[in-house]
Amino acid sequence: MSEMGRERSSTRQEQILQIAIDLFSQRGFAAVSVRDVARAASVTLPTIYHHFGDKRSLYMEACLHLFSDWGQHHGRLLRRDGTPQQRLFDYFVSLCHSLASDLKFSSLLQREILERDTAGIRRLTEATFRGHFEQVAQLCRSMGCKGNVALTAHTVFALAFGLAQLRPIAHELGVAKSIHRAEAMARHVLGVVLHDINWSGLRFGSEISGAKKRATAAAGE
């Protein structure tokens, strides 16, 4: 295949995946057929089968594609400069904002868990979540956390996901205002699990902003 042909094929696959993500996140796995995806993408059924195989494979590729983009976007916050506290805070602020606003991601994640697709959850964990989980555990350890830091990391993730996904119930219970903003939600989650750390003074990206200001001032001297 020529270079141009490969580019067209890659573009077509990207378009099919984006449409599959939209349909699966809106309706779920069972309610979407391969024909539905082909029709929405204006391609033939053989084109879908050629690129992705059966419906389950298409669904999993759509999930992996979306979750990979999500992982890369948030993962950079764990790797950048700053204290462990600031990096952890920034990561969970970004995570909480995404969970509350990215309906495609949260819908697909919830559907995958509810359907109890063990093989699918394993692939998604290895492709996206394990790296983040291990980095969060390492940051917890570097802040002096004792005991099972892996469980500590998992608990922070579980609280963040749970609070974000139960926002409608929190609204009815009258407690939604306390965690309406992503910073407030992240500060609450981290404070519950890592209660020996003072999270109240942290602001999203504050160390990065401070570093930029210092660099600018130094350059002007």
Image: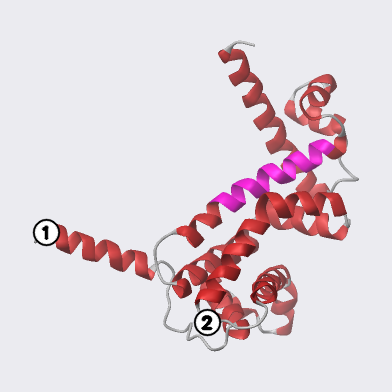
Indicate left or right for 83 with 156 as reference. Answer: left
Q: Is residue 179 above or below residue 25?
A: below
Judge whether residue 71 is colored magenta. yes
Percent x, y for residue 28?
84, 49
Label 2 – label 1 distance at C-alpha? 38 Å
Q: How far from the left and from the top, in percent, is residue 90?
A: 49, 67
Figure quadrant of residue 18: top right
- Vertically, is 179 above or below 21? below
The kind of secondary structure element at disc 2 is loop
Task: Characterize the local packing of mark 1: few (<14), some (14-19) or many (20 or more) Cα atoms within 10 angstroms.
Answer: few
Residue drawn at (79%, 21%) of the image = 47
Magenta part of the chain:
57-72
Q: Nearer the viewer, mark 2 or mark 1?
A: 2
Question: Can residue 103 be seen in the rendering of this structure?
Answer: no
What residue appears at the point 57 percent right and 87 percent down from the top-left corner? 195
Q: Position of residue 188 (x, y in %)?
A: 58, 81
Work out whether residue 218 can be spotted.
yes
Instruction: Give me the residue at 76% from left, 31% from top.
Output: 40
Secondary structure state at the residue bearing disc 1: helix
Q: Quadrant of residue 160?
A: bottom right
Look at mark 1 in the image and give the residue it sits on. 220
Tag 1: amino acid: Gly
The image shows residue 214 at horizontal and vertical percentages of 22, 66
